[in-house]
Amino acid sequence: MILNIETSTNICSVAATEGKNVLCSYRSENGNHAHDLPLFIDNILKTLREQGKQPDAVAVSQGPGSYTGLRIGVATAKGLCYGLDIPLIAIDTLQVLCSSLLEAQNSLPDNAVLCPMLDARRMEVYTALYDTNLQLQTQIEAKIIDETAFFNTVNDKTIVFFGNGSQKCKEVIKRDNVIFVDGVVPDAKSMGLLAEQKLKDNDLADIAYFAPFYLKEFHATVSHKAQDVLGIPS
């Protein structure tokens, strides 16, 4: 049984899974991960204890995604692993997003290539290409989207775009071999089978040294009002 944590976007979700079965889960979309995540985990652990169960591992969505969300999710996951003396499993967020798509869609073309997109501000997205077996086909990257994006990519196949970064691409990427699917988000409930396979393969993260996969460095900014108060030149 695996406790799965997903905090890469404004959505915070936690799920206890055994294979395909979701034993219990919680989800919020208010972006307040620091408040919601501990409550969700506490409720799930209480439910499991009532059933005489305890997690065998903790799986966390490792990024890319929101810097703050990933930091909170990974720190919480590591703390649980230390406290419960169980292993840590790290799963690529874009793979989780693909898993969420496949659970929601059962009518994709046979030749489909999956292109999850997470918003990285302006016209940039975190993205990669996967096949329908969730195997990575290209490297994960921060990609600027324009009319030439993916122009020379798998022209003989159907590319499926989804995720919160795909919305801004609809007016830019216009070709016959593309499909946009709305409403797909990374969710802890979609992590169970991915995490279980990694546990079976002993593909575990080092709890002491593991860090989120931010992909881009975090750059803090100071508002103009704060600059005036602190005397910082703009």
Image: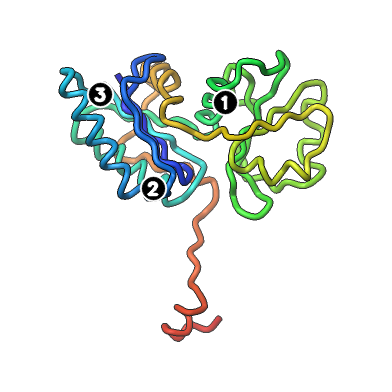
Q: CA distance from mark 3 to mark 2?
A: 22 Å
N-term-proximal mark, 3 vs 1 = 3
Q: Residue at the location (44% across, 37% down)? A: 62
In the rendering, at what x and y percent does residue 162 appear? 63, 34
Q: Position of residue 160 (x, y in %)?
A: 69, 28
User: Which part of the image, by quadrant, shows the N terminus?
Assistant: top left
Q: Secondary structure at mark 1?
A: helix
Q: Secondary structure at mark 2?
A: helix
Query: Circle 2 is placed at which residue position?
Result: 71
Q: How many marks?
A: 3
User: Which residue is found at the position 65% from the left and 55% from the top?
Assistant: 122
Amino acid under disc 2: Arg
Mark 1 residue crowding within 10 angstroms, few (<14) / some (14–19) / many (20+) = many
User: Along the polypeptide, which appears first: circle 3 or circle 2?
Assistant: 3
Position of residue 123 in the picture relative to residue 2 (left or right): right
Q: Which numbered marker is on residue 101? A: 1
Q: How far, Cα to Cα, is label 3 from label 1?
A: 26 Å
Look at 34% across and 16% down and name the residue there: 18
Label 3 is placed on what type of residue?
Pro
Q: Which residue is mark 3?
A: 55
Q: Nearer the viewer, mark 3 or mark 1?
A: 1
The answer to whether residue 79 shows anywhere in this view is yes
Mark 1 vs 2, N-terminal side? 2
Tell me if mark 3 has few (under 14), some (14-19) or many (20+) residues whose alpha carbon lies within 10 angstroms of its own: many
Where is residue 82? Give x, y as percent: 22, 35
Q: Secondary structure at mark 3?
A: loop
Classify mark 2: residues with Cα within 10 Å, few (<14), some (14-19) or many (20+).
some
Is residue 139 among the parts visible in the rendering? no
Relative height, residue 59 to residue 173 (above, below):
above
